[in-house]
Image (cartoon, rainbow, N blue to C red):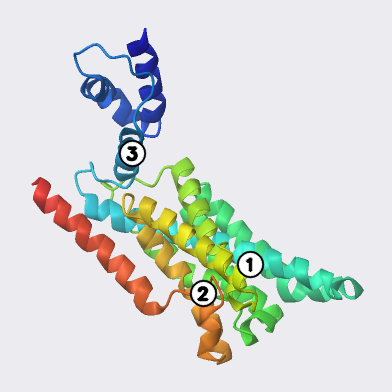
Amino acid sequence: MSSDVLEKRYRVLLRAYPASYRRERADELIDTLIGDEPTTRRWPSVREAASLIRGALRVHGGSTAARPTAVLLWQGIHLAAMALLALGVLIGLDDIVEAFQFGGLSDPLAVLRNQGIHTIMVGAALVALVAGRTRTAAVLVVAAAVVPTAISQYLFLNSLPQWWAPVLATPLIVVGLRRPADVPPAPRANAVLVTAGILALHLISAGGLRRVDTSAQIVAAGTVIAGAAAFLWVATADQRLLIAAAPTLLLGTLHQLGNAGPSGELLYRPDALPSLVVAVLMAIGAVASTRLRQRTRA
């Protein structure tokens, strides 16, 4: 009876793997985990649970594909475009709410003209990309980078992060149209989860680092460290996240450079913390480690 309960709980963990992988390997994995000897255990160990989850992340990241490096690059590019657009929408919505809180209600059309049209168009491009309409998304993202700026130069003149989102996403989506036929697209549900994880990384509250109160600084530093550690734990298994997150890390830096703000400000903004060097190293590290594993496996 204990073995039956333990097997059910292992199978719950195995649901983190893609369905095709479970159909081929689930029984083999269960036999390996439980073994032939009777057991009184009713729960998987923490180490086993963590190993199974990391294994699932690696499979989602293409580690079992015929060309894992190609999967990493092409799916990473697609996920990066999604994450950029989602982050642009998130920042845009936040700025619109802030605009209405501080006087925007007196001239809502100005808020719509300066910020709303851009957010709507970026959102439309994101929806098309999530739905798998890549060509439609390519047209919409180009329009989102051009049309709102022609209507109002508010975002452009202030070099706001949401203005950069479709600008950076455009070449990624266009390049993604050339994805090789033997590289599968990122599954929609998985792509949404990856995008949500990258957004969570950017939502880490680092604002407390600016406060005089030492306890607030400690809490903020702990939050940043814990959030970054959680992201890296996932991203070192599914390294598509390193490719996908790299362009999003540039939005805050480009905003700061566009406004020629003091370099010290980069230390206080969660969207500006990573630099161009960090983003590039993340992408290079992901590709290099994937190629190394591929050679080892061969």
Q: Quick one: label 1, few (<14), some, or many (20+) residues within 10 Å?
A: some
Whether residues under marks 1 and 3 lie with C-beta atoms below 8 angstroms apart, the answer is: no
Closer to the eye: label 1 or 3: 3
Reply above or below: 58 against 129. above
Query: Quick check: 292 above or below 284?
Result: above
Give the residue at x 46% y 50%: 194
> Label 1's element?
helix
**10 Å crowding of disc 3: few (<14), some (14-19), many (20+):** many
What amino acid is at disc 2?
Answer: Leu
Mark 1 or mark 3: whose residue is earlier in sequence? 3
Residue neighbourhood size for the residue with mark 2, other residues' Cα within 10 Å, grouped as few (<14), some (14–19), many (≥20):
many
Q: Which mark is residue 56?
A: 3
Whether tag 1 and tag 2 are in contact, CB under 8 A, the answer is yes
Q: Secondary structure at mark 2?
A: helix
> Residue 111, position in %: x, y?
79, 73
> Quadrant location of residue 104?
bottom right
* 53 relative to 31 in the view: left or right: right
Calculate the distance from the C-alpha at mark 1 to the C-alpha at mark 3.
31 Å
Q: Amino acid at mark 1?
A: Ile
Residue under pointer 1: 91
Place of residue 207 in the rendered image (x, y in percent of width and height, measured from the top left): 61, 72
Judged from the image, the secondary structure of the residue bearing numbered disc 3 is helix
Comparing labels 2 and 3, the label whose residue is closer to the camera: 3
The answer to whether one can see residue 209 in this image is: yes
Which comes sooner in the sequence, label 1 or label 2? 1
Write down the quadrant of residue 98 in the picture: bottom right
Which residue lies under the disc numbered 2? 251
6 to the left or right of 146: left
Find the distance from the CA under tag 1 to the CA under tag 2. Answer: 10 Å
Please provide percent x and percent y for residue 75: 36, 53
Residue 123, which numbered label?
Answer: none
Q: Residue at point 38% right, 57% down? A: 232
